[in-house]
Image (tube, rainbow, N blue to C red):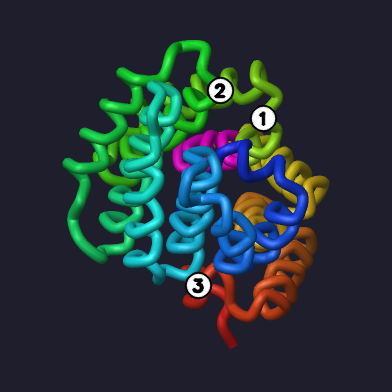
Amino acid sequence: MTDTAVSESVVGVPDVWRLRARGCWVEAAALLAPFCDDDAGAALRRAELLVEGCFYHVDGWAEAEDALRLAEALASTDEERGAAASERGHLAYGATLFSVRDRADEARSAFGRSAALLSPASPGRPLLDFRRGLVAENIAGNPTAARAAYRRAHAGAVAHGNTFLTSFTWRHLAGLAAAEGDLAEARHGFAESLRIRVSLGHLVGTAPALLSLADVESDPEAGQLRAEATRLYALLNGIPAWLAPTLAP
């Protein structure tokens, strides 16, 4: 599944959240731009937004790279450096996943740096664990390692109260369960992911969640879920772009 999560710090800014939840990453990033010249936190949040936009548009890589370089330059604490390294790994993972350029080694190296910099109790650790799970699942083809990473991420997200991240951990654990034929577990995880995204108003992530649940449901429920996903995809003008083969007319 081509899904991604952004840190809780971005979710917690109301105007930024409302824009990014509707697929307006550039506009959300623009709200943070005036603070980025000397604020490492704002620079990192802006980079996170633009990196996430790459995953949904499959475009904008150069702009995200520029924003990330600024965030890396401003980072002055281990927490900030670790978060920036996590974002560096995520951008490299995305470029590899979408065949822009093979940066898998860079992703692994950056995630390793992030793990060394972030303390075990850091609120950024669950997101890092989740992202390492993505590499294990989608680049290394190692579902066992991916499941372990997703479970660590899920437990950490719950402990830190990061409900948004749990929508991603539920979804990816459910995907692994579906691949193994455990449809009951898959339905539960996909349903939890969908419930959270709807409750948070995360429109750009709702269509993928609907489709995932539809894949493990029977008709007529499956057909209704797909119809709602198609409606949302049209409402958001074809975002996420990678759903086009499934939902484009």
Of mark 2 and mark 3, the one earlier in the sequence is 2
* Residue at (26% x, 41% y) in the render: 107
Instruction: Indicate the position of residue 13 as horizontal and vertical percent values.
Output: 71, 45
Q: From the top left corner, tell me how far across and down residue 140 is, in percent.
A: 25, 39
Disc 1 to disc 3, C-alpha distance: 26 Å
Residue 153 as seen in the image, left or right of residue 112: right
Q: Residue furthest bottom?
A: 249
Distance of label 2 from label 1 (alpha carbons)? 9 Å
Discs 2, 3 touching: Cβ within 8 Å: no
Circle 1 sits in a helix, a strand or a loop, which is it? loop
* Residue at image mark 3: 241
Above or below: residue 46 compared with residue 78 = below
Any mark on residue 162, and which? Answer: 1
Question: Which contiguous range is marked in magenta?
Answer: 168-180
Q: Quadrant of residue 10?
A: top right
Sequence-earlier tag: 1 or 3 = 1
For the point 37% across and 30% down, the residue is: 81
